Image (cartoon, rainbow, N blue to C red):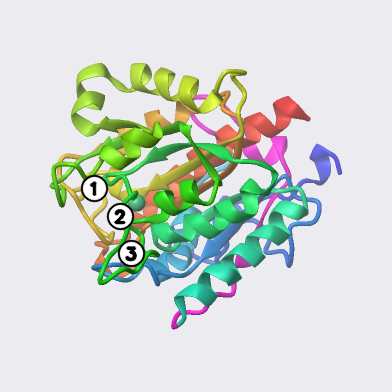
Amino acid sequence: MTASTFHQPVDAAEVPRFAGHSTFMRLPAVSDATGLDIALVGIPWDGGTTNRAGARHGPREVRNQSSLMRRVHHVTLTEPFSLANIADVGDISVNPIDLLDGLKRIETGMRAIVDAGAIPLSVGGDHLTTLPVMRAVAAGGPVGMIHFDAHSDTNDTYFGGNRYTHGTPFRRAIEEGLLDPNRTVQIGIRGSIYATDEHDWARAQGIRVIYMEECTRRGIADVMAEARGIAGGPAGDGRTYVSFDIDCIDPSMAPGTGTPEIGGFTTREAQALVRELAGVRIVAADVVEVAPPFDVAGMTALAGATILFELLCVIAEGVAARR
Ligand SMILES: [Mn+2]
């Protein structure tokens, strides 16, 4: 497959944005990831949500808002659809009433994408969906992670010993050997915590936890330079998972999410964060926790769709550089 045969989005100058099939970036919907460099995939599942449910509706609404994206990044001039073959492979077939079966289905669906040789760029769903994605992606060895979030998501159990919630995915991922804590950095962490030692376990494993206040003090470029160094590891090119929880953005700009925390990034800062991922060896990425039932005028889904486009540009540049 060559650049001239890569899938292309519907041109909004030809067909208006509100018309036609609703797919990620207005790309063709395909049945599987064969021949793709990057697979856009929905994971409409929020079975791990502890408070405000609704992220199961995220993929459909992010698809809708992604119709506002165009072909070229206005700063980097990246043309993702010329650099890589990208399409919408649809949604993972999930089970909304059985948590463990839901996790299994997500892992199976993601494994098919990974086995086809495509980089999965997924849209959740709550943050527990990242765990089964990592189970598929980390089959070849543990990944590092650059994680944007208000929360560390490394708690142990909820509600009488339940180990699988959207507050626990990264503790499970480390226990299962999927995630290398020494190559993991969490950015934008804030909000009240359950106990004074809530983040001690993560730090003891080796995770670098960067609170929002430190981001504000140091600035985005400095923080992201550190993040790239951590995720890259000793060789500098470590396989890295990028996880973007929409609640890292302030709820004044992204209210449609399960666990909002004030004092967060602006959407403009969030774009700058993702642009600073250039050069990172990204093997999978996600945008999670967009919950349309709590959204206002689609603004959170639009933020999610725009971050998805920013991620797509960075990942496509990486695909082209390694081709
Ligand atoms: Mn999270």
Q: Mark 1 or mark 3, which is nearer to you? A: 3
Q: Earlier in the sequence, mark 2 or mark 3?
A: 3
The C terminus lies in quadrant: top right
Question: Which circle marks residue 253 in the picture?
Answer: 1
Mark 3 closeness class: few <14, some 14–19, many ≥20 residues within 10 Å: many
| Residue with the mark numbered 2 | 299
Mark 2 closeness class: few <14, some 14–19, many ≥20 residues within 10 Å: some
Mark 3 Cβ and ligand 1 under 8 Å apart: no
Residue 27 in sight: yes
Residue segment shown in magenta: 73-97
Residue 206 vertical placement versus 40 (above, below): above
| Residue with the mark numbered 3 | 291
The spot of residue 157 in percent (x, y) is: 31, 62
> Identity of the amino acid at label 1?
Met
Q: CA distance from mark 2 to mark 3?
A: 11 Å
Residue 72 in sight: no
* Point 45% across, 79% down: residue: 96
The spot of residue 89 in percent (x, y) is: 66, 62
